[in-house]
Image (tube, rainbow, N blue to C red):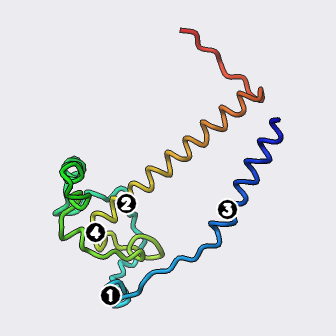
């Protein structure tokens, strides 16, 4: 019965990946959405954009970001209150965050917070993967974990 369940899960996963992997992303290109007119200011080096979410002048502190955004969500005003209105309307160019030459000064606060959140989520995923691997190895008897009896 276990082999049948494994085969069923594998088949369902393969069908899902085949169906969703062939979709095409389409986006409407408008004059306002086009960032090709934006002048990229090269800094000449690759500075780190990691954990720069609240480091610039005029940025909200992390506590203000969370409290203002939470108030906006619970009052029905939406999530746009996490950052300032000016910052929320600022376009973001990925070339400022990644590549040979980065420029963290051109990144709006919402983009810097997004990068920070992505890094934290990636670290959490790796830690979860390690925990799951150790749990699987322990369950199958490949490793022996100490028994803590409190």
User: Mark 1 or 3, which is nearer the eye?
Assistant: 3
Q: Nearer the N terminus, badge 2 or badge 1?
A: 1
Question: Around disc 1, counting alpha carbons within 10 Å, would you say few (fewer than 14), some (14 to 19), or many (20 or more)?
Answer: few
N-terminal-most mark, 3 or 2: 3
Secondary structure beneath disc 4? loop
> Quick one: SS at disc 3?
helix
* Residue where numbered disc 3 is placed: 17
Kindly identify which residue carries mark 4: 108
Of the two numbered discs 4 and 1 on the same chain, state the one appearing first in sequence.
1
Q: Position of residue 9 (x, y in %)?
A: 73, 47
What is the C-alpha distance between the residues marked 1 and 3? 39 Å
- The crowd level at tag 4 (other Cα within 10 Å; few <14, some 14-19, many 20+) is many
Q: Provide residue 134's location: percent of width, then percent of height.
A: 66, 33
Find the distance from the CA under tag 2 to the CA under tag 1. Answer: 22 Å
Q: Pointer 2 and pointer 1: residues touching (CB < 8 Å)?
A: no
- The correct choice, above or below, for 31 with respect to 119 in the image is below
**Residue, x 53% and y 76% (percent of image)?**
25
Mark 2–mark 4 distance (CA, rounded to whole Å)? 10 Å
Determine the secondary structure under disc 1. loop
Residue 39 numbered tag = 1
Q: Nearer the viewer, mark 2 or mark 1?
A: 2
The first of marks 3 and 4 along the sequence is: 3
């Amino acid at each position: 019965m276990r082999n049948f369940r494994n085969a069923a899960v594998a088949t369902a996963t393969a069908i899902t990946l085949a169906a969703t992997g062939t979709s095409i992303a389409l986006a409407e290109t408008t004059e306002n959405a086009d960032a090709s007119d934006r002048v990229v200011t090269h800094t000449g080096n690759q500075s780190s954009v990691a954990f720069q979410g609240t480091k610039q002048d005029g940025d909200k502190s992390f506590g203000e970001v969370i409290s203002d955004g939470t108030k906006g969500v619970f009052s029905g005003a939406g999530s746009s209150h996490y950052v300032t209105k000016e910052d929320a309307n600022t376009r973001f160019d990925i070339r400022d965050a990644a590549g040979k030459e980065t420029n963290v000064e051109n990144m709006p606060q919402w983009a810097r917070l997004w990068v920070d959140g992505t890094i934290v989520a990636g670290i959490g995923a790796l830690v979860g993967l390690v925990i799951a691997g150790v749990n699987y190895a322990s369950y199958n008897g490949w490793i022996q974990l100490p028994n803590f009896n409190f």
